[in-house]
């Protein structure tokens, strides 16, 4: 399971190259939007 999460995070990083990633962190919620 841990390995699957790592691969998923890496895919998000690759998407950032083609788009702008906005990370918004709140008290206990983390919102990540890729445009």
Image: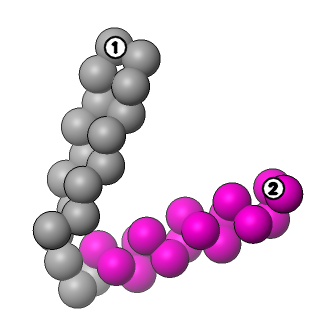
x and y percent of residue 5 in the render?
69, 60
Mark seen at residue 27: 1
Callout 1: helix, strand or loop? loop
In the image, residue 12 lies in the stretch drawn in magenta: yes
Majority secondary structure of magenta residues? helix
x, y percent for residue 14: 40, 81
Residue 3 at x, y = what percent?
Answer: 80, 65
Whether residue 25 is situated above or below residue 28 in the rendered picture: below
User: What range is drawn magenta here?
Assistant: 1-16
Q: Is residue 20 left or right of residue 16?
A: left
| Local SS, label 2 | helix
Whether residue 15 is situated above or below residue 8 in the rendered picture: below
Where, by quadrant of the figure, is residue 19 drawn?
A: bottom left
Q: CA distance from mark 1 to mark 2?
A: 25 Å
Q: Is residue 11 left or right of residue 24?
A: right
Q: Which labelled disc corresponds to residue 2?
A: 2
Whether residue 4 is in magenta: the answer is: yes
Q: How many other residues sit within 10 Å of disc 1, few (<14), some (14-19) or many (≥20)?
A: few
Q: Residue at x 29, y 22 (%)?
A: 26
Determine crowd level at label 2: few under 14, some 14-19, many 20+ residues with C-alpha closer than 10 A.
few
Q: Is residue 21 above or below residue 19?
A: above
First reached walking from the N terminus: tag 1 or tag 2:
2
Quadrant of the snapshot with the C terminus: bottom left
């Amino acid at each position: 399971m841990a390995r699957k999460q790592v691969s998923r995070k890496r895919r998000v990083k690759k998407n950032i190259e083609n788009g702008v990633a906005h990370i918004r962190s709140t008290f206990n919620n983390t919102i990540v939007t890729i445009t």
